[in-house]
Amino acid sequence: MTSPGVQDASDALKRVFGYDSFRPGQQEIVEHVVAGGDALVLMPTGGGKSLCYQIPALVRPGVGVVISPLIALMQDQVDALRALGVRASFLNSTQTFDERRDVERAFLAGELDLLYLAPERLQLESTGRLFDQAKIALFAIDEAHCVSQWGHDFRKDYLLLSTLHERWPEVPRVALTATATEATHTEITERLGLAEARHFVASFDRPNIQYRIVPKNSPQRQLLDLLRTEHQGDAGIVYCLSRNSVERTAEFLVANGVPALPYHAGLDSRTRAENQSRFLREDGLVVVATIAFGMGIDKPDVRLVAHLDLPKSIEGYYQETGRAGRDGLPSTAWMAYGLADVVQQRKMIDSSDGDFAFRRQQSIHLDAMLALCETVTCRRSQLLAYFGQRDTPPCGNCDTCLAPPESWDGTIAAQKFLSAVFRLKNERNQKFGAGQIIDVLLGKDTEKVRQHRHDQLTVFGIGTELGEAEWRGVVRQLLAQGLLGVEGEYGTLVLTEASGEVLGRRREVLMRREPARAAKPAKAAKGARSAAVVELPEEARPLFEALRAWRSATAKEQGVPPYVVFHDSTLREIAARRPAALADLAGISGIGENKLNKYGEGVLAVVAGEG
């Protein structure tokens, strides 16, 4: 026999959210928090973390308080909950005094189910006094990895959250994140005092996402080709390392017929807010952004996340790629990666203001990222192993599975290149970048070669068995394996301690050779779809498009993103089943009581009109 709390949770799931059953892992977490237990939840983006605190907040007496770093997105999060009939609001610095006073009044009057606020508000004693005067159902700490000083997204204000349990010990806490290595997991546990909490660690696998990393060769053109051939009209996010690169890429896409918007910290706050709002509310837009964009983005139909520059860590890469395909439909995580990326990242670490321990940690992050780029095995297996999920079989839905690369013995090539670095340095103790060294190995007669008399060296012309692109791959992989170093403002190449092992013939060097054929375009691999996603018969597509048009018009009229009205997965099921009455519509996943009452008649009219 189920307990009242468990039954209440199941009722809320169906009545409010319109789902018949929990996703894997959710129910156990919900039951634990409803019963008053503390929890630390590690679950991938799109895995349904929000329900793990939203339903307990609805079931337990009092108001659920959600700590979130995402001030710019709180309005959208609250709009989505209100569309479900949930009494939600937020407190942050964007509000006027009167607006904050109205929210506080509703909080004290018991007129809210959920209250969102930024962590810095916990510094205010007025916030503590407010919490002391009301019944709090739970504290939800979203994006809990922000507490980790070794992580990729540290927020100093998150260190304040350790005081929650000290001041309100009877209130259960649930900390949630989609990005945590074993080390970050341990740090979250220690800093938030969650050693006695139950820890729920779901699989980090997102099988609907196809991971692809390609050699960088005119990356903007490569991106444009990808958008035109595989993601025409799809929503996408493109990440670049610098603001200038963001601006240039967005302008390039627009000039070539792709609707694109820039997003970076150099834009004024109004432009950033407008561009983010357009991305959430309009279909088919591409945002080109620095990593400042994306955390907490709930847009479920992002079909492509692309990186034109190498991310600094696997944690950052995983979180950013996880913004694709939150609805469970096939999506692409694509990256263009080249030698300049490796040199730039090494140079940034070496010139960092951080102490030795910080630079060492950054180097470890970069080494893991490079290993993922250069692997000849399944990328997904290596990605999951980084997060502690080891010994997973090849996925069949990444580029190294679909078009396996070869490995080759690059020892002799490595010896030739390292010898050239040594010889060129001996000439007046000068150091050179990859381009000059490759020119020497290829025996090129250039002005710079003649100027430095490099054509007189014994290494001149000894590398003609490889082409220039192949040599750049050799350099990239030597850097990735720590057999070459980067030094100085201009990123000149230098030998490392490990270089001597290769030159002394005490170490073999295996390298990756790119496959002649590219990986297949993104499509649904076996097991890649969420169980909730309904196949759409071809004859149902006109109705699906009509429903999307109705949804866009409705969302625009209400000033909310289209997915707040209904997700694509819900519209697909409506189109496939063609409900004729409200009772039929009530049985479709994602349609709770409030949405049925609010949108039911409009949906049925669209279905009837396409009959």
Image (spheres, rainbow, N blue to C red):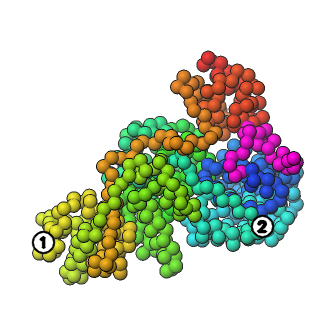
Q: Amino acid at mark 2?
A: Leu
Closest to the observer, 22 or 592: 22
Q: Is 256 placed above or below 185 here?
A: above
The dot on residue 164 is: 2
The dot on residue 455 is: 1
Instruction: Name the residue located 57 percent from the left edge and 32 percent from the top edge.
Output: 535
Rounded to the nearest angstrom, the CA distance separating label 1 from label 2 is: 69 Å
Give the quadrant of residue 566.
top right
Instruction: Name the residue located 37 percent from the left edge and 42 percent from the top edge.
Output: 225
Residue 277 in the image: state x and y as whole percent.
58, 44
Q: Which residues are magenta?
A: 1-26
Asked if one can make out residue 499 in the rendered structure from this viewpoint, the answer is no
Give the quadrant of residue 521.
top left
Residue 530 in the image: state x and y as whole percent.
60, 42
Instruction: Name the residue located 19 percent from the left edge and 62 percent from the top edge.
Output: 465
Closest to the observer, 217 or 48: 48
Q: Is residue 275 magenta?
A: no
Is 408 placed left or right of 134 in the picture?
A: left
Closest to the observer, 569 or 291: 569
* Callout 2 crowding tier (Cα within 10 Å): few <14, some 14–19, many ≥20: some
| Nearer-N-terminus badge (1/2) | 2
Residue 540 in the image: state x and y as whole percent.
57, 24
